[in-house]
């Protein structure tokens, strides 16, 4: 063999060896044991109080047992979260209730299995504005998280009840983390989303609360816990443990104000990447600004959402409560006990 052919052969073998190592170590193509490992049971969330029970469940489980079988996966907005769920990357997620219902209408294999919260939303206006009543929103620009959000339906409901035609306001979609800056710069006149971003504008001094949802739509639901049907089929016990964990976290959060303040500290630091004073503020002022009990799926609540959503064109109206929910995971309210855990155990 000539020296040129020998060099060529050596180079070729070297490339093959490097490619094999890359495929094995980095891509796992030639590692059957990796393929057999169970994929993490990811649960999507964005850093809002509507999704707070997701990181609380994960944190408490890790403190109590040293591990969690769930992997909270943070997103900044609902469009990206939605696509991750549709693709199957997320077997479960916290998501806007009307958006989950619309996905079901569009053929996505999604089932709502539990609620994330009650209330927990405000509309905030610039404190320098002359907006003091809902009627003053005529001609104004209002930012909502998503056209399929219950915040948009809340705006529709509030305007209708105060005699303001929907075509007399401009509604724009905006990721909740971007809303405070838009209000501060006066790019929009009003913002509404899950907390703590409404509280941020209020706490920083340039926002003023126009209304709390508990004053306009008592028992308001923004986000729900939804699971893919294949996850329900293949991992039913895991889904049940997830729902049970969310239920126990909710009871734990609403058990004492100390628990809420403790959650504000560890969730801000380890999950939300926010200043703890922000979560502390919205979880305490007022204490019923957002609630984490009474999270069972109640048909009358969803029928009210359906009616508003169909009226505003958000839903087509071709699915029912039984189509987009699975109530079999919902524990009886009387049986739910808060986690028997104290934050001081970690110190």
Image (cartoon, rainbow, N blue to C red):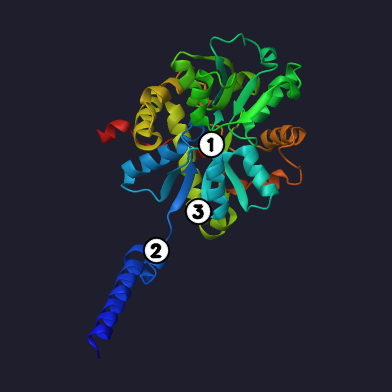
- Identified at 35% across, 29% down, the residue is 265
Q: Residue furthest left?
A: 3
Q: Are marks 1 and 3 in contact (CB under 8 Å)?
A: no
Mark in the foreground, 2 or 3: 3
Does any portion of residue 297 appear in the rendered image? no
N-terminal-most mark, 1 or 2: 2
Sequence-wise, which precedes: disc 2 or disc 3? Answer: 2
Q: Are marks 2 and 3 in contact (CB under 8 Å)?
A: no
Residue in the foreground of this view, choosing between 17 and 90: 17
Looking at the image, tell me whether mark 1 or mark 3 is earlier in sequence order. 3
Cα gap from disc 2 to disc 3, whole angstroms: 16 Å
Tell me, for residue 310, which label it has, or none. none
The foreground one among 328 and 172 is 172
Residue 311 drawn at (x, y percent): 77, 33
Quarter assignment of residue 222: top right
Label 1: few (<14), some (14–19) or many (≥20) C-alpha neighbours in 10 Å: many
Q: Nearer the viewer, residue 327 or 6?
A: 6
Q: Which residue is mark 3?
A: 89
Label 3 secondary element = loop
Q: Look at mark 2 in the image and give the residue it sits on.
A: 37
Q: Locate the N terminus by quadrant.
A: bottom left
The residue identified by callout 1 is 116
Residue 40 located left or right of residue 78: left
Question: Secondary structure beneath disc 2?
Answer: loop
């Amino acid at each position: 063999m000539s020296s040129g052919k020998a060099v060529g052969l050596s180079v070729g073998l070297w490339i093959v060896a490097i490619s094999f190592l890359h495929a094995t170590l980095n891509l796992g193509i030639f590692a059957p044991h990796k393929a057999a490992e169970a994929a993490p049971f990811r649960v999507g969330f964005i850093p809002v109080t509507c999704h707070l029970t997701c990181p609380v469940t994960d944190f408490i489980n890790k403190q109590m047992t040293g591990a969690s079988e769930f992997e909270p996966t943070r997103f900044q907005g609902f469009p990206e979260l939605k696509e991750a769920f549709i693709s199957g990357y997320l077997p479960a997620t916290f998501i806007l209730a009307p958006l989950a219902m619309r996905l079901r209408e569009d053929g996505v294999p999604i089932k709502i299995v539990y609620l994330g919260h009650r209330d927990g939303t405000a509309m905030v206006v610039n404190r320098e504005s002359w907006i003091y009543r809902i009627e003053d929103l005529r001609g104004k620009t209002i930012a909502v998280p998503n056209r399929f959000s219950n915040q948009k339906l809340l705006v529709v409901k509030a305007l209708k009840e105060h005699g303001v035609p929907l075509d007399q306001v401009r509604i724009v979609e905006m990721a909740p983390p971007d809303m405070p800056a838009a209000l501060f710069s006066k790019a929009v006149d009003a913002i509404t989303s899950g907390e703590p971003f409404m509280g941020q504008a209020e706490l920083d001094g340039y926002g003023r609360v126009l209304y709390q949802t508990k004053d306009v739509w008592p028992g308001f639901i923004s986000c729900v816990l939804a699971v893919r049907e294949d996850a329900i089929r293949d991992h039913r016990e895991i889904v049940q443990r997830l729902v049970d964990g969310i239920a126990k976290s909710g009871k734990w959060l609403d058990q004492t104000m100390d628990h809420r303040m403790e959650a504000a500290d560890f969730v801000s630091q380890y999950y939300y990447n926010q200043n703890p004073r922000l979560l502390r503020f919205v979880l305490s002022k007022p204490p019923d600004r957002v609630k984490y009990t009474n999270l069972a799926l109640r048909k009358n609540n969803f029928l009210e959402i359906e009616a508003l959503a169909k009226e505003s064109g958000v839903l087509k109206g071709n699915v029912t409560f039984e189509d987009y929910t699975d109530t079999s995971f919902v524990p009886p309210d009387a049986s739910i006990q808060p986690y028997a855990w104290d934050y001081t155990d970690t110190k």
